[in-house]
Amino acid sequence: IAMAGQGRRPDFAQTSPQWMHDALEAARVAYLYRSSVPVYVASPVYAGLLMLALWDATTAGVLVAWFVVTVGTSLARAATYAAYMRSDRGDPARWEARFALGALAIGAVWRAPPMVFFADASSVGHLAIFFVIGGALIGAAGMYSASRAAFLSFVAFPMAASPFSLSFQPRDPFPVLS
């Protein structure tokens, strides 16, 4: 493979046959879907555990509504997975975009704990919120590693919501932590 200059990586899309590039893209998206199956169960489980931890801190109706939206979003993502598995798996870019849209949706759902529930939560509730969100963000690094778009779509909302929420808390040390 001809290099464009010393120390530069080759552009494999330019030097590899198109069929190889297409096969690698299809395999990358297939891996993304295959590796995501545990997330469709884990997200509602973690949401349920967080709901229990925050039960006395905020309105039960708001917590239950958030939990229902979390479950619904996870079911929609599982339906996208099922559609992918039933399909001929053509057009990997389209399937990656669908996956990233689902990741964006569940990421938006996960912005609620720091934005909505944090102010009324106890110290244990604060810890639970950031423990669950931090774990989800760390898990996303591995689960969505096959797609930059999916990873960034998932982490955008929780990563922005957490420091934003902390910065508006009236007591120390939260503004400093943001």
Image (cartoon, helix red, strand yellow):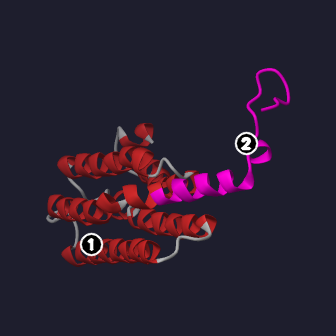
- What's the distance in space between the residues labelled 1 and 2, CA to CA? 44 Å
Nearest to viewer (mark 1 / mark 2): 2
Q: In this figure, which residue is indicated by the disc labeled 2?
A: 12
- Residue pictured at 53% horizontal, 53% vertical: 28
- Residue 167 in the image, given as x and y percentages of width and height: 45, 48
Residue 26's place in the image compared with 137, above or below, is below
Does the magenta run of residues contain 109? no
Query: Is 69 situated left or right of 9 in this image?
Result: left
- Residue pictured at 52% horizontal, 74% vertical: 88
The residue carrying pointer 1 sits among few (fewer than 14), some (14 to 19) or many (20 or more) residues within 10 Å by Cα, namely many
Q: In this figure, which residue is indicated by the disc labeled 1?
A: 67
Query: Is 47 situated left or right of 167 in this image?
Result: left
**Stretch in magenta:** 1-30
Q: Which of 36 and 171 is in front in this view?
A: 36
- Residue 32 in the image, given as x and y percentages of width and height: 46, 56
Residue 61 found in image quarter: bottom left
Residue 3's place in the image compared with 106, above or below, is above
- Residue 135 in the image, given as x and y percentages of width and height: 32, 46
> Which kind of residue does numbered mark 1 sit on?
Phe
Residue 57 found in image quarter: bottom left
The residue carrying pointer 2 sits among few (fewer than 14), some (14 to 19) or many (20 or more) residues within 10 Å by Cα, namely few
- Residue 89 in the image, given as x and y percentages of width and height: 53, 70
Query: Is 98 situated left or right of 142 in this image?
Result: right
Q: Nearer the viewer, residue 10 or 134?
A: 10
Quadrant location of the N terminus?
Answer: top right
> Which kind of residue does numbered mark 2 sit on?
Phe
Lower position in the chain sequence, tag 1 or tag 2: 2
Does the magenta run of residues contain 16? yes
Q: Nearer the viewer, residue 93 or 139?
A: 93
Quadrant location of the C terminus?
Answer: top left
- Residue pictured at 43% horizontal, 37% vertical: 176
- Residue pictured at 21% horizontal, 46% vertical: 123
